[in-house]
Amino acid sequence: QLVESGGGLVQAGGSLRLSCVASGSIFFFHLNEANWYRQAPGSQRELVARISAGGSPTYADSVRHRFTIARDNAKATVDLQMDNLKPEDTAVYYCNVENIWGQGTQVTVSS
């Protein structure tokens, strides 16, 4: 399973760090890419950032240069550092590895 933490309420321009811990059936975490998605009310779920098994990141255009994804294979964690947050970043953020999803964590950015 995947368990996210770190969401909350922050003012525009602030920062949050999301963490995702893999456990249980994800025995080969280190062999898989890991993803952070988000879903705002009334919108489709969208990919925010991805990190390959080897550690290479890719980002959605809307978050590039503001968000940083990182993984620690020894701890089976994938984190998302979010800086210079904007109200449009408000969404539920989900961690994903293969076909496994976390429960989501709410991020709310006030203007």
Image: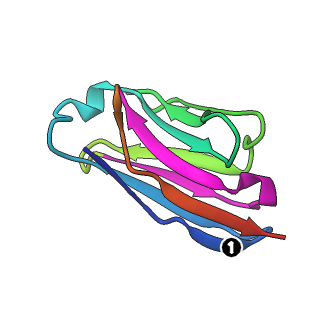
Q: How is the image coloured?
A: rainbow
Q: Quadrant of the N terminus?
A: top left
User: For the point 39% across and 50% down, which residue is it?
Assistant: 103
Relative to 83, residue 29 above or below: above
The answer to which of 46 and 57 lies nearer the viewer is 46
Q: Position of residue 82 (x, y in %)?
A: 64, 57
The total number of labels drawn is: 1
Q: Quadrant of residue 101?
A: top left
Q: Amino acid at mark 1?
A: Val
Horizontal side of 7 relative to 42 (left or right) equals left
Q: Position of residue 104 (x, y in %)?
A: 45, 52
Q: Residues within 10 Å of mark 1 (few under 14, many from 20)?
A: some
Q: Residue furthest right?
A: 111
Comparing 57 with 26, the one in front is 26
**Residue drawn at (55%, 61%), measured in percent from left and top?**
106
> Magenta includes 47?
no
Read off the magenta span: 77-98
- What residue is shown with label 1? 10
